[in-house]
Image (cartoon, rainbow, N blue to C red):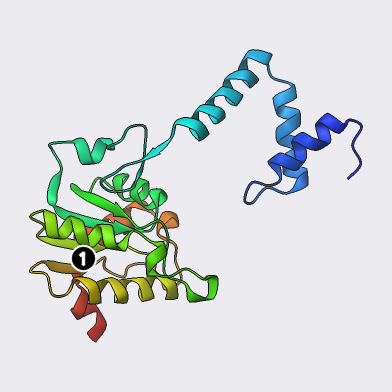
Amino acid sequence: MNFSSKLLENAVLEFSKLPGIGQKTALRLVLHLLNQDKSDVERFSVAMTKLRNEIQHCRVCFNISDHTVCEICASHKRDRGTICVVEDTRDVMAIENTNQYNGVYHVLGGLISPMDGVGPSDLEVDTLVERIKANEVREVIFALSATMEGDTTIFYLHKRLKDFKINISTIARGIAFGGELEYVDEITLGRSIATRVPYESSLAK
């Protein structure tokens, strides 16, 4: 792609580094910004800079947060006896949008994937174990994507948690194998949370 301006080329290059954004889409986005008021573009730039510089991870659940402790963990209305284990922040948002869950979360920060060099030590597994030891937890729900990596992670977590006196469940598989949690519609995901099953029962099927 030939550019009439080096500044334009550099901006397009940066946008095309975003996932799912090719050069043509990047060019369209950059040209759109060029057609906006300078104040609008400056607000966009400031928002991105503040996001990168000021965003935190909740010290309790590791969800993305504006503060040391996220709003969910800080809320007295949430059931702290139930922990829903998810891969990342996108899954927290997906489950919250269902309005079917009132417990708290634990964000692993990924899934076990030997092919990608990701092992248990790369995830927030030990911190999950410590949370269960330190708090009166009744149930842990595995809400991970129905993929090979998701199932491998659940299997490992179950081995780490099975000796605790807690209920261990997994979301019902109204989700097709290979499906990413964030792309599941809210009704299906909500029902999967509400009709969760004991993990060991899911193995027998």
The residue drawn where x is 21% and y is 48% is 104
* Res. 162 in view: yes
Q: Is residue 18 left or right of residue 80?
A: right
The residue drawn where x is 20% and y is 55% is 83
Where is residue 86, by image quadrant? bottom left
- Locate residue 23, reporting x and y percent: 77, 46
Q: Is residue 33 above or below residue 20?
A: above
Check the picture and name the quadrant holding the N terminus: top right
Of 130 and 112, which appears nearest the observer? 130
Report the residue that reaches farthest toward the bottom: 204
Where is residue 2, by image quadrant? top right
Q: Label 1: few (<14), some or many (≥20) within 10 Å?
A: some
- Locate residue 131, reporting x and y percent: 19, 55
Secondary structure under the numbered disc 1 in the rendered image: loop
Q: Is residue 126 left or right of residue 33?
A: left
Q: Is residue 178 above or below residue 139?
A: below
Q: Is residue 180 left or right of residue 46?
A: left
Where is residue 4, by image quadrant? top right
The residue drawn where x is 55% and y is 30% is 48
Check the picture and name the quadrant holding the C terminus: bottom left
Q: Is residue 122 above or below residue 30?
A: below
- Locate residue 124, reporting x and y percent: 33, 58
- Locate residue 203, reporting x and y percent: 25, 82
Residue type at the position of mark 1: Arg
In the picture of the structure, the residue carrying the numbered disc 1 is 196
The residue drawn where x is 47% and y is 68% is 118
* Res. 147 in view: no
